[in-house]
């Protein structure tokens, strides 16, 4: 009971306000809602398609694998935010002489409560969303109630989200206790090596050759298998290459930085290229997929004019629908995770931001640095991965470009929409930044 | 050749009978039910070094923040006698106060509060870049100041790679590099051991009052206060006792340094390695 009393002491709304205490809950709500919707949709599609059920399953798997990255990013960001929020107050508790075990118990308990409340709310939101999202038509009919997860499955998701949050709280706590200063003032920028980059380039080359060989024949199944393989390879490549490319481009911007904001932004990205990548990796993966699948669909579309069976034609339509849904969903997750990560970073750096304001640094400089540190890596990775996809699948993308130039525009449009979503999230967190810099919170 | 930002502006050199560089009159500041300042007044003359002492919670930081235009008092006025004449700080807008702090004041905080991702030289240069100085020039001046404060060769280190005393010297360089005539320091040695503390105080005084700048510093440490020309004590939000360390507080009655050889001027040539535009590989 003493632990509970201390937990209340730590968890009750602080001077920083109720809004900040609610942020982690909101983050868990969004994560869980998106997770439940995605799983529901996947479960519904798993049994769709009749004769070509395997094709549906394959594309559902691809969509799921695409959504895993941004979803993990969002969940991780939510957990980090929940952990960070109370670090300083936990430190105070420790100073007041609370035993270390009790402090840890409080931290874990709070993470569990925040995650559980958020996840339960999220599950509710997801079920409210089913009628709207269920209107999307697959295999000629709306998904409807078939995408509603069972009560047991929903409870399982809520529990899983809570457990992940608790696990991440335990890990985060250990890091803080081991190196209280190391966390705040990292002595070294995280490194990104040449080896993964070299491996990545090798995979791109191999996949490209593979596609050229396979792409020669025209059969639908061969195209589909080729797409699947090169797609998996591409995602792997992206993950290896992403942090490296982000570091290279930030290094270039650091050398060119002429303004305080540009210097701060470049250094911030260079300080943790992997973190910057984590924030935008979902967008990179989805823009890669948009090119691959978009090109594939265009080709199949051209083919369907002549010789496609009715079922294959419907599959083509559904792939296109699924692509749009996945792109929108993934960018939504990326935007949410950027919002959560930014909120956490702003809270984390509030004292530093306030000190800069005291020195007379205009708010606009700090705000602009914060935005650049997100947007530049986002642009580099989304455009970079779209180009990578186009190169890997050159014969396919070239053909698609000739046959269906509109498909290219759709892809560019979806990337632009994603960037705009992230921009909007940055705008949404600007008041928090302003508050962090002001003397009267 | 001396860099344009380094030499102390003429008006800050100690002058007998010079008007106060900063004046607080009857400051009252409340935070909810707490009264942090209850009618505090203080006038600081150019070239002076003033230590503000007092119990924890007596309002030292709040007074410093009001003097520096960081916080606005509920009652009372603050005047700053700058190069462009007298400015009523308390009547300025947020943006104007921010610009005033940027161009006229330097700050050293207890914990340094340097940007951890930036190198030492970039942290110092940032203060100039925010005011519009080009990066190359800013880093050159910054490197000069770092060298002057005994940090030559450490320009490219990140803040986490510096000791507490070194980091505080970087913070001092950042406060001085813009050529600000008035430097505020809130317990600048509070986190340092006594030996390092003496070093840092030496660096701070050597670069401020010794060259005619004005220093207002909050400290708990009597040894630190003893090195300032004047000490004021705060009790419950008012300046209760005010005494000078010596009968004739030196800096403003007797300018200590001849203006021609300014010890604060950084070396004309920056260190041999180029600071600008180099990616930090560490
Ligand atoms: N931002 C603030 N919000 C609420 N109370 C504050 C704030 N800043 C200072 N105080 C209160 O005002 C009083 C004076 O604080 P401060 O000037 O920081 O004292 P000192 O620096 O002498 O220790 C203290 O009681 C402190 O708790
Ligand atoms: Mg104080």
Image (cartoon, grey):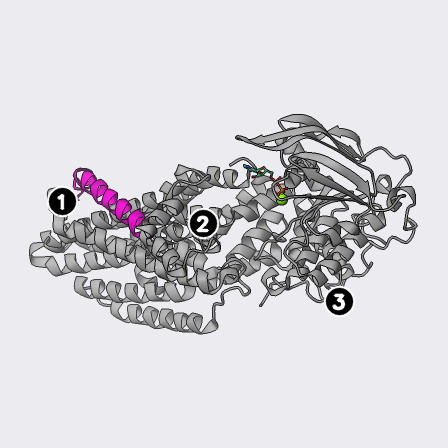
Label 1 within 8 A of ligand 1 by Cβ: no
Residue B70 seen: yes
> Is residue A128 covered in magenta?
yes
Residue that badge 3 annotates: B272
The quadrant of the picture showing ligand 2 is: top right
Furthest-left residue in this view:
A50
SS at mark 2? helix
User: Do badges 2 and 1 share one subunit?
Assistant: yes
Asked if labels 1 and 3 touch by Cβ distance under 8 angstroms, the answer is no
Q: Chain of mark 3?
A: B
Question: Which residues make up the magenta segment?
Answer: A111-140
Figure check: A192 above or below A321: below
Residue that badge 2 annotates: A89
- Residue shown at 64% from the left, 51% from the top: B110
Q: Residues within 10 Å of mark 3 (few under 14, many from 20)?
A: few
Residue that badge 1 annotates: A143
Q: Label 2 to label 1, Cα distance in Å?
A: 47 Å
Q: Nearer the viewer, mark 3 or mark 1?
A: 3
Residue A417 seen: no
Q: Label 2 to label 3, Cα distance in Å?
A: 46 Å
Q: Chain of mark 2?
A: A
Image position of B276 (left or right of A218): right
Picture coordinates of residue A61 (x, y %)? 21, 59
> Is residue A58 covered in magenta?
no
Q: Residues within 10 Å of mark 2 (few under 14, many from 20)?
A: some
Q: Quadrant of residue B65?
A: top right
SS at mark 1? loop
Q: Quadrant of residue B233?
A: top right
Q: Nearer the viewer, mark 2 or mark 3?
A: 2
Q: Chain of mark 1?
A: A
The mark found on residue A121 in the picture is none
């Amino acid at each position: 009971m003493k632990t509970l009393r201390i937990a209340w002491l730590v968890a009750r709304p602080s001077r920083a306000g109720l809004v900040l205490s609610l942020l982690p809950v909101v983050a868990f709500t969004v994560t869980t809602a998106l997770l439940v919707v995605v799983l529901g949709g996947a479960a519904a599609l798993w049994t769709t398609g009749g004769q070509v059920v395997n094709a549906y399953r394959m594309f559902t798997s691809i969509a799921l694998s695409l959504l895993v990255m941004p979803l993990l990013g969002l969940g991780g960001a939510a957990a980090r935010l929940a952990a960070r929020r109370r670090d300083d107050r936990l430190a105070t508790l420790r100073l007041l002489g609370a035993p270390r075990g009790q402090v840890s118990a409080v931290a874990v308990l709070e993470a569990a409560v925040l995650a559980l409340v958020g996840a339960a709310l999220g599950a509710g939101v997801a079920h409210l969303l089913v009628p709207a999202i269920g209107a999307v038509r697959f295999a000629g009919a709306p998904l409807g109630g078939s995408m509603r997860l069972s009560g047991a499955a929903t409870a399982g998701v809520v529990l899983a989200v809570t457990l992940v949050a608790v696990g991440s709280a335990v890990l985060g706590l250990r890091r803080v206790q081991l190196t209280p200063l190391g966390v705040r003032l990292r002595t070294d920028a995280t490194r990104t090596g040449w080896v993964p980059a070299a491996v990545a380039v090798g995979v791109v080359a191999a996949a490209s050759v593979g596609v050229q060989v396979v792409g020669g024949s025209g059969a639908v199944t061969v195209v589909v298998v080729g797409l699947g393989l090169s797609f998996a390879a591409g995602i792997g490549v992206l993950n290896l290459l992403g942090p490296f490319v982000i570091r290279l481009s930030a290094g270039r911007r650091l050398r060119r930085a002429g303004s305080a904001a540009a210097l701060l932004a470049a250094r911030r990205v260079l300080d943790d290229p992997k973190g910057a990548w984590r924030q935008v990796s979902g967008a990179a993966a989805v823009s890669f997929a948009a090119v691959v699948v978009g090109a594939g669909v265009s080709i199949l579309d051209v083919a369907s004019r002549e010789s496609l069976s009715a079922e294959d034609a419907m599959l083509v339509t559904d792939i296109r629908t699924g692509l749009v849904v996945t792109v929108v969903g993934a960018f939504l997750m990326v935007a949410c995770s950027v919002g959560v990560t930014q909120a956490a970073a702003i809270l984390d750096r509030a004292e530093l931001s306030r000190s800069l304001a005291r020195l007379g640094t205009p708010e606009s400089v700090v705000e602009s640095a914060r935005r650049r540190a997100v947007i530049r890596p986002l642009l580099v990775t989304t455009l970079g991965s779209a180009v990578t996809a186009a190169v890997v699948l050159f014969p396919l993308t070239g053909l698609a470009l000739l046959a269906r130039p509109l498909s290219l525009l759709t892809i560019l449009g979806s990337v632009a929409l994603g960037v705009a979503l992230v921009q909007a999230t940055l705008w949404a967190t600007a008041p928090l930044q302003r508050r962090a810099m002001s003397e009267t919170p | 050749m001396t860099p344009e930002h380094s030499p102390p502006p003429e008006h800050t050199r100690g002058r007998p009978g010079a008007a106060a560089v900063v004046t607080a009159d009857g400051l009252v500041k409340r935070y909810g039910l707490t009264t942090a300042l209850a009618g505090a007044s203080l006038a600081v003359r150019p070239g002076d070094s003033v230590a503000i002492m007092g119990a924890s919670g007596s309002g030292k930081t709040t007074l410093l923040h009001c003097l520096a235009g960081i916080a606005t008092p509920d009652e009372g006025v603050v005047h700053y006698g700058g190069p462009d004449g007298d400015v009523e700080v308390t009547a300025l807008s947020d943006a104007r106060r921010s610009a005033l702090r940027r161009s006229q004041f330097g700050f050293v905080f207890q914990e340094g509060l340097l940007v951890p991702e930036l190198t030492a030289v970039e942290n110092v240069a940032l203060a100039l870049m925010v005011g519009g100085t080009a990066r190359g020039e800013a880093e050159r001046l910054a490197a000069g100041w770092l060298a002057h404060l005994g940090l030559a060769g450490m320009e490219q280190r990140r803040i986490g790679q510096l000791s507490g005393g070194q980091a505080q010297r970087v913070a001092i360089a950042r406060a001085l590099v813009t050529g600000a005539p008035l430097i505020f320091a809130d317990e600048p040695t509070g986190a340092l051991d006594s030996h390092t503390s003496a070093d840092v105080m030496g660096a701070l005084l050597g670069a401020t009052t010794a060259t005619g700048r004005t220093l207002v510093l909050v400290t708990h440490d009597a040894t630190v206060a003893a090195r300032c020309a004047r000490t004021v004590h705060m009790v419950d939000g008012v300046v209760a006792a005010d005494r000078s360390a010596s009968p004739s507080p030196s800096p403003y009655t007797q300018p200590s340094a001849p203006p021609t050889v300014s010890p604060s001027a950084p070396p004309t040539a920056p260190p041999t390695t180029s600071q600008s535009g180099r990616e930090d590989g560490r």
